Amino acid sequence: MKKIFSRIAIGAIVGVGIGFIISIIFSAIKGNGDFLATTPEFLSKFDKEVDAVIVSTILYALIGIISSLSSMIYDVKNEKGNLFLKTIIHFIIIIVTLMIIGSYLTWYEFSALSIMIFILLAVAIYFIIWTVIYFIKKDEIRRINQKIKRSWY
């Protein structure tokens, strides 16, 4: 239970942090020198800008929480240990989350082309992150095996 609460807290913080970084990048591209906490289309859904920022921050935290909790699928021990299947399940959870929340936050237009571009970007980013994590874990395993090997001699 402690591990779940820890993942929720860390996921929320990371989600808000990444959301803030995305806001900075979006502002640099489209802000004309102004900071845009969220898209103008999303802002227009609210009477006050602060309400839009609060909602988007909560949703960024939710993305982080879902991402963090769904990564627990990799902790499940089974005889087959099918990394590919776990990755597909995790990817589906992440992409569905991003599609739903991204649509509400107006990150993309609701058109076939925009959705396709959004999915392709998500796949590319997911692949890069997964590859980096894979090689980090592979190196950790190599170092653990070396320590075990040294302890035998």
Image (tube, rainbow, N blue to C red):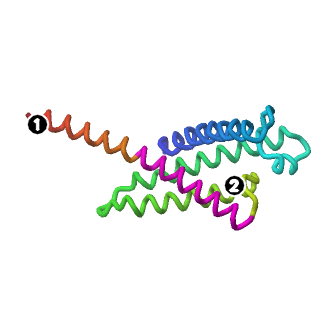
Nearer to me, 150 or 134: 134
**SS for dot 1:** helix
Residue 49, how many percent across, how many down? Answer: 86, 40
Residue 124 location (% of width, % of height): 53, 53
Are discs 2 and 1 less than 8 Å apart at CB?
A: no
Q: Position of residue 25 (x, y in %)?
A: 68, 38
Residue 9, position as x, y percentages in the image: 57, 39
Side of 149 where 52 appears, left or right: right
Comparing 43 with 57, the one in front is 43
Q: On screen, 108 above or below 149?
A: below
Real-space Cα distance between discs 2 and 1? 51 Å
Q: How many residues crowd around disc 1 within 10 Å: few (fewer than 14), some, or many (20 or more)?
A: few
The image quadrant that residue 34 belongs to is top right
Magenta-drawn segment: 111-133
131 in the magenta segment: yes
Q: Main secondary structure of the magenta part?
A: helix
Of marks 2 and 1, the one in the foreground:
2
User: Residue lying furthest bottom in this view?
Assistant: 112
Tell me the number on the disc at residue 101: 2
Q: Give the position of the C terminus as an image quadrant.
A: top left
Q: Looking at numbered disc 1 in the image, what kind of residue is underneath it? A: Trp
Secondary structure beneath dot 2 equals: helix
Q: Which residue is mark 1?
A: 152
Q: Three-letter amino acid code at disc 2?
A: Ile
Q: Residue at x 62, y 49 (%)?
A: 63
Does 8 sit left or right of 72 as displayed?
A: right
- Residue, x 68% and y 59% (percent of image)? 100
Q: Write the residue at 72% across / 52% down.
A: 107
In the image, 23 versus 116, the foreground residue is 116
- Confirm whether the magenta stretch covers residue 88: no
Q: Earlier in the sequence, mark 2 or mark 1?
A: 2
